[in-house]
Image (cartoon, rainbow, N blue to C red):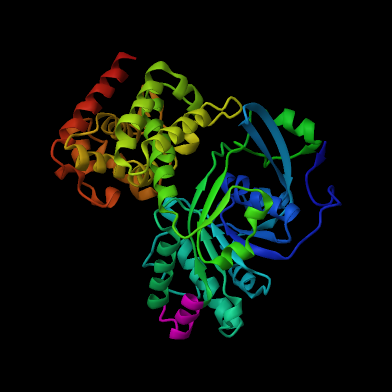
Amino acid sequence: MKTLNRQNSPNISERPIKVLQFGEGNFLRGFVDWIIDIMNEKTDFNGDVQIIQPIPNGMGELINKQDGLYHVQLSGIQNGTAQEVTRLIDCVRGVLNPYEDYQSYLKLAENPDLKFIISNTTEAGISFNPNDDQKDQISDSFPGKLTALLYHRFEVFHGNKERGLHIIPCELIDKNGEKLKEIILQYASLWQLPNGFIDWLNESNTFSNTLVDRIVPGFPKETIKDIQNAIGFEDNLVVKTEPFHLWVIQGPDAVKRDFPADQAGLEVLFVKDQSPYRTRKVRILNGAHTSLVPVAYLHGLRTVRESVEDPKVGKFLIDTIQNEIIPTLDLPEAELKQFAQDVMDRFKNPYVKHLLSSIALNSISKFKVRVLPSLLEYIHRKGELPQNLIHSLSALLLFYKGTFNAESTPVNDNEEIISFFEQIWQSDDTEHVAHQALSNIDLWDRDLSTIDGLEAAVINQMNVLSDLEKVK
């Protein structure tokens, strides 16, 4: 079987690099790059993607070995019919690791064809690190790296207003574009960059708030041999996704003009306000995912599909969405219920084995963004505690213990959060653990232990789940 690379695929052409993409993970390759690839086919976009590896260790070496080529397999129900469609993605030119070659990274800003910065560095990625205090040294944070890149572009083109960029972050935080711009301005102040750069940043660059929606389980380990036999290549970067996709981009008309995804028949919406779409998606789809993971995992389930089809856990999830999440939203109830039904159908996709462990990354920050707003709004509107959401929060604290029922739980978070939970779980006293976790403002941006009755309810649910562990 032939190795997948450009030498073995001679009919693939190279286009001008118009996109710098921070992040090389499955989601960006199965969503953004798939969209760009279709745009290249169906519109006059004519642009390739250069990926920037945002952390020291990543998938760059593997992607470069295949010259950026890989396949996306869409598997799911479309128009009532089960379908599997595989597409070769050829718009990715490769990956550059700025930790290995920082000057080559900065030089990417000198490209006159460059139009877009796209990113997905997880919810925790758009943050300010005061230790990144030197513009001439690589920053640990993504916004710090981007500030240095933008400033280099400003200098090289002498502040030319025509050389500004469209910056389209895909991180799942509210007003992600505005937040990213705010942090870049923080770095500009910290580094004492000239006012001319700030004026250029404000006047010549656009920062779009966005919403992305596609379930991307990633590498299809169990069926990869069949896929490779079908495509005739040894592709070790296949990305499996569902057919459904939605990208809502809030920005000026220039973004729509320069990024003509809607002309390619894709579900990419250019809007003046993405808030209603974001709230619906984050609370129902992502909130359901995040609520489900610790509960299902502690019940011995390992995939999304088997979890929603489990009589007990599936009913828990439906009840959570219908009775505790939807009542906190202001969109029409019929629309919300239809969206919720679509979400459950997507979770049951027979082609997708979506591991709970693969969506457990940064579960604390995800819970804060996706679930906690529903929990707090429910209390505000109903004057009582949402029992299912509290059950999920309790399961999350047990999940972060690192073991349950004599098995490791796939905790995957930043070092500070992991160290914190390792410390508080040195005690098996659930009252101690619950209080320490709920009162940690760094985790939730507020002291949850001050909410009347919440801590007692969490302790009770943790004890119930602990009893479940003992029974097993």
| Relative to 292, residue 368 above or below | below
Near-viewer residue (439 or 331): 331
Near-viewer residue (254 or 121): 254
Given the current orientation, which residue lies at the most extreme right position? 10
- Choose top left, top right, bottom left or bottom right for residue 222: top right
| Horizontal side of residue 399 vs 308, given as left or right | left
- Residue 29 point in image, percent of width and height: 62, 48
- Residue 243 point in image, percent of width and height: 61, 37
Picture residue at 63% right of the left edge, 65% below the top: 258
Count of numbered circles in the view:
0
Give the magenta part as a residue range: 191-203
- Choose top left, top right, bottom left or bottom right for residue 390: top left
Picture residue at 42% right of the left edge, 76% below the top: 188
| Horizontal side of residue 40 vs 297, given as left or right | right
Main secondary structure of the magenta stretch: helix
| Relative to 446, residue 297 above or below | above
The answer to whether residue 100 shows anywhere in this view is no
Residue 202 is a magenta residue: yes
Quadrant in the picture for the N terminus: top right
Residue 364 is a magenta residue: no
Given the current orientation, which residue lies at the most extreme top position? 471
- Residue 392 point in image, percent of width and height: 31, 32
The answer to whether residue 196 shows anywhere in this view is yes
